[in-house]
Image (cartoon, helix red, strand yellow):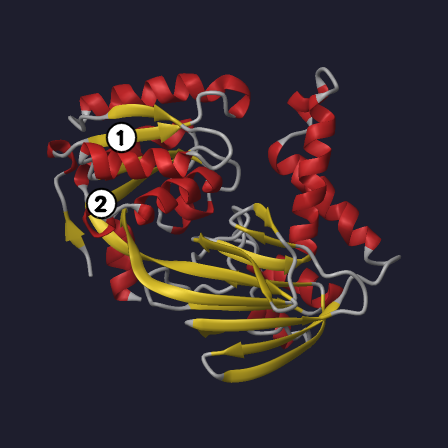
Amino acid sequence: MVTSSTPTRRPAILIANPSAQSGKAAEWIRHARALLDEAKVGHQFLATEPGGATVELVRKAIDDDAVRLVISMGGDGTFAEVAKGVLASAHATEVDMGMLPTGTANDQGKSFGLGAGPGAMEANVAVIAQGVIAGCDVGRLEIERGDKTVFRDLFFDSFSIGLGAASLATRNRDRERTRKIPGLSMLYRDQLVYAGALLQRFMESYLVDIKFDLDAVIDGRVLHYDSLLDVIVKNTRIFGGEWVFDPAIQADDGKFELVPLAGRRDLTAKLVSAFRHSPLTSEDLKSLGIAVADPVAGARFELTIRSEGALPAAQADGEEVPAGERYRIQVLPRALRLIVPREHVESAAVD
C-alpha cells in the first residue's frame, strides 16, 4: 500500500554524523539542512551518538518530542540505527522515515530508487518533501550457540554468513591499522579497503578450507547446502552497492531471499551476472553450462551450520555479529514506513 503524507507540517529531525567521510559530512549536513528549509521541511538536527546510543536518541525524539518524520543521512549503518530507534518507539506506525544516502554502499537508498552522495541531495530532499510512503519489511534475528541465545537484533538490508562477513572483520581490522599511518587512510578507505579484504580472504580460501555446510528450514521447507563459501539473506534489492542477486526482490512483500554461494565457481558466476552493469545474466551463464544456485524466498528461516573448523563469521547490515551454530530469522512485514520516489512505487506496481 502506498500513501502520501505532509512532512512539511510535522515535527521532524535530521540525524547524521558530522565527522563521517573524513569530516566532509559536516558540509553535506549544512547543504542538506538548507535544502530542507527551502523545501519547507521544518526540522531539527541531531548528531549520531557512538556505541548504539543513536537508537535511544531517536526513540526519545519520537516518544518525548512528538517527532513524526525522521530523516537518516549517511550509510546503511546509520539507516539501521535510526530505523531501530523508530521501531523501539511507541509510535512506529505513525512515523515516516526519509533517506539521504551518503555512505559507502547505500544499499537501502539505491534499492528504493534514490541517488547517492552529495550530488543527489537536491533530488532526494524533493522526494522527502513529496512524502510518498512505501512499506519496508524488517528481519528479526536470533543467534544461538549451544542451548543459549547469544544475540538478538533487527536488520533491514542483509544478513550473511561466511566469506563476506569474514572480509568485513578483516576490513575493520585493516581500517584501524591504516588510520594510524598518516596519508594512507585518505587513499585506502571505504570500498577500496573492503575490496582488499575480500580479495585477501578469497585467496586464503585456496590455502585454508573455510567452507561450511548448511541445513536450512525455510517456511517449513527443508534444504541442505554443502561446501558453501557464503550465504546471504537479503531484504532489499541491491547488495554491496552494485549487485542484484535477484531482480524479483521486493522489500515490502513479507519475504526475504536466501542466496547461497556454493564454492568459488558459483561465487564468481554470481558476482559477474549480478553486477548491475554486467552485460551477462544468470540465464546467459546457464546457456554456457555455468549453473548458479537459485535464491529461495521465505518469511521464516532456521539456519544450522555444520563446520569441522571454527564457526564461520556473520554480519548484519554491514556490522559484525557473533558467530553461531543456529540462526533464526523472522520477517516482520512492512514494519517501517519509508519515504520513496513516486517512480519507484509506480514501477513496482507494474512489475
Q: Would residue 329 appear left or right of 42 to someone viewing this image?
A: right
Q: Which mark is residue 95?
A: 2
List x then y, in percent, for residue 60: 29, 35
- SS label for mark 1: strand
Q: Quadrant of residue 195?
A: top right
List x then y, in percent, for residue 222: 56, 84
Residue at (26, 19) in percent of width and height? 34
Residue at (56, 74) in percent of width and height? 294
List x then y, in percent, for residue 71: 30, 35
> Which residue is at the front of the view, 229 or 288?
229
Q: Earlier in the sequence, mark 2 or mark 1?
A: 1
> Which residue is at the front of the view, 23 or 281?
23
- SS label for mark 2: loop
Residue 114 at least partly seen? no
| Residue that mark 1 sits on | 13
Three-letter amino acid code of the residue under disc 1: Ile
In the rendered image, the quadrant that contains the C terminus is bottom left
